[in-house]
Image (spheres, rainbow, N blue to C red):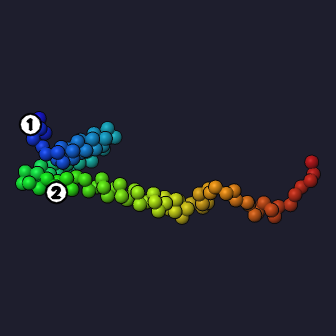
Amino acid sequence: MRFIERLCPPALLYLIFVTLSVGIDASLGLFVTAVVKALLGLVTVVVLDAFCGIDLGVVSWFIVAAPFVITALATAISIGLMVDQRVSEHFTMSPLPTNSPKQDSAADDLPVSTDL
């Protein structure tokens, strides 16, 4: 517990993130992935804490925060550009429905039967 108490805030935040990630992987039965993440996560926590120890806390915060900021920016850009709508239109046979009803031109060519 002393190790955790002495961690600087960016290293502690990353440790919490890694613990949650490893717990999710273990609960899904991905044990090899969980072990690899745990080992790499502990190494990263030690490196982040070492940066804080030599007065490079800003670098530690940048390393921890950069993936979250990049993901948020990428999500905002893709929503703004409607990337998912364009991709689904490209890979599906029919485009996504719009607000205006579309008339079927093939239905106009069918003969009308009056036999009842």
- Numbered mark located on residue 88 in the image: none
* Any part of residue 38 in sight: no
Q: Say which label, 1 or 2, has the lower sequence index.
A: 1
> Who's the residue at 23% across and 42% down the image?
16
Looking at the image, which residue is at 49% across and 60% down?
Answer: 82
The percent position of residue 17, horizontal first and vertical second, equals: 25, 44
Q: What's the amino acid at mark 2?
A: Val
Most extreme residue toward the top is 1
Residue at mark 1 to residue at mark 2: CA–CA distance: 24 Å
Secondary structure of residue under mark 1? helix
Say which residue label 2 marks.
Answer: 59
Q: Quadrant of residue 7?
A: top left
Q: Which of 76 and 26 is in front in this view?
A: 76
Please identify the quarter of the rendering in which residue 34 is found: top left
Quarter of the N terminus within the rendering: top left
Residue 29 falls left or right of residue 85:
left
- Measuring 61% from the left and 60% from the top, which residue is drawn there? 94
| 19 relative to 73, above or below | above
- Pinpoint residue 74: horizontal percent, then vertical percent: 37, 59
Of labels 1 and 2, the one closer to you = 2
Name the residue at the right extreme: 115
| Residue found 9% across the figure and 41% down from its top | 6
Q: Mark 2 falls on what kind of element?
A: helix
Residue under pointer 1: 2
Along the viewing direction, whichever of 73 and 40 lies nearer the viewer: 73
Residue 33: image location, x then y, percent: 27, 47
